[in-house]
């Protein structure tokens, strides 16, 4: 199994309510457990229909991970530049 598939499964395990949005991992930070998720069906994301999310996986059951939602790739890039 590819690393991105394993991380996507972990995400769905931690946030089963977002499984219908068809999350796929498109990037991972090398210094943390943060991943960038692309939702193939953003209309299924109840938090506003966002297409992307940065997620800090918790790796424990019954704990929802921290998530930051983004409208598009450029919105995520812009926020990353602001925090740098």
Image: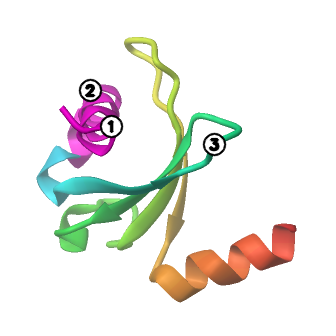
Front-most of 81 and 30? Answer: 30
Disc on the earlier residue, 1 or 3: 1
Q: Neighbour class for label 1 at 10 Å: few (<14), some, many (≥20)?
A: few
Q: Which residues are magenta?
A: 1-18
User: In the rendered view, would you say 61 is above or below 54?
Assistant: above
Q: Residue at x 73, y 71 (%)?
A: 80
Whether residue 74 is in magenta: the answer is no
| Element at label 3 | loop
User: In the rendered view, would you say 79 is above or below 30?
Assistant: below
On the image, the x and y values in percent for residue 9 come to 23, 33
Name the residue furthest top: 61
Camera-nearest label, 2 or 1: 1
Whether residue 4 is in magenta: the answer is yes
**Image quadrant containing the C terminus:** bottom right
Q: Which residue is mark 3?
A: 30
Numbered mark located on residue 13 in the image: 2
Q: Main secondary structure of the magenta part?
A: helix
Numbered mark located on residue 3 in the image: 1
Q: Relative to residue 82, is residue 69 drawn left or right?
A: left
Q: Residue at x 25, y 71 (%)?
A: 42
Front-most of 35 and 1? Answer: 1
Q: Relative to residue 77, is residue 11 drawn left or right?
A: left
In space, the residues marked 2 and 3 are separated at their CA atoms by 22 Å
| Element at label 2 | helix
Q: Circles 1 and 3: CB distance less than 8 Å? A: no
Front-most of 30 and 8? Answer: 30
Camera-nearest label, 2 or 3: 3
Q: Neighbour class for label 2 at 10 Å: few (<14), some, many (≥20)?
A: some
On the image, the x and y values in percent for residue 18 come to 25, 47
């Amino acid at each position: 199994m590819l690393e991105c598939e394993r991380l996507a499964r972990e995400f769905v395990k931690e946030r089963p309510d977002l499984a219908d949005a068809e999350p796929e991992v498109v990037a991972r930070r090398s210094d943390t457990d943060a991943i960038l998720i692309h939702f193939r069906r953003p209309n299924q994301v109840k938090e506003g229909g966002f297409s992307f999310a940065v997620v800090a996986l918790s790796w424990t059951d019954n704990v929802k991970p921290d998530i930051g939602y983004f409208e598009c790739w450029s919105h995520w890039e812009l926020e990353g530049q602001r925090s740098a």
